[in-house]
Image (tube, rainbow, N blue to C red):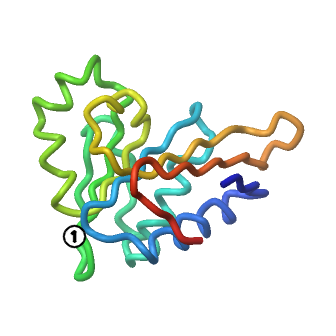
Amino acid sequence: MNIISNSEQETIELGKKIASNLKKGDIIVLSGELGSGKTKFTEGVLTYFGLQEEISSPTFTIVNEYNTQKLNIYHFDVYRLNDIDEFEAIGGEEYFEKGACIIEWGEMIEEILPKNYIKINFSRNLDYENKRDISIECIGNSSVYI
């Protein structure tokens, strides 16, 4: 599935729509260069759950944990990890079944991801500064509703 986002707000709205169907065990892998929309998408997911005041990038902490009445959300940024061993050392795989996981730069750990996950790739549009080309791929038996 391919989507065009014309603004940060549209990317946030996409995150909210996908969040409305998230459940325990869902994993979303976000890929794309710096500034392509991964964090804005995550902002949308967290806003859906009423966490807009708590949003921060886990760039230096690797994972931020958000507990809501409906679902626990684990937001990873694995950009600074040297290898998969570091992810395993922090117990990263244990989070996969505890709630919904959003993993920025998740392609770095794809070989240890469960067989079912959603992969979303963000690309800047070189002709329009605020436009993003977003592709969504369901891996295994995962599904996404928009």
Residue 111 on image: x %, y %: 31, 29
Dot 1 falls on a residue whose secondary structure is: strand
Residue 17 on image: x %, y %: 55, 73
- The image quadrant of residue 71 is bottom left
- The image quadrant of residue 126 is top right
Q: What residue type is labelled 1?
A: Asn
Up-down relation of residue 54 to residue 93 (above or below): below
Up-down relation of residue 119 to residue 105 (above or below): below
Viewer-closest of 21 and 61: 21
Q: Which residue is drawn at 61% across and 38% down?
A: 35
Determine whether, in the image, residue 142 is placed left or right of residue 98. Answer: right
Q: Which residue is drawn at 39% across and 50% down?
A: 117
Q: Identify the residue under disc 1.
A: 67
Viewer-closest of 79 and 20: 20
Local crowd at mark 1 within 10 Å, few (<14), some, or many (≥20)? few
Question: Which quadrant does the C terminus fall into?
Answer: bottom right
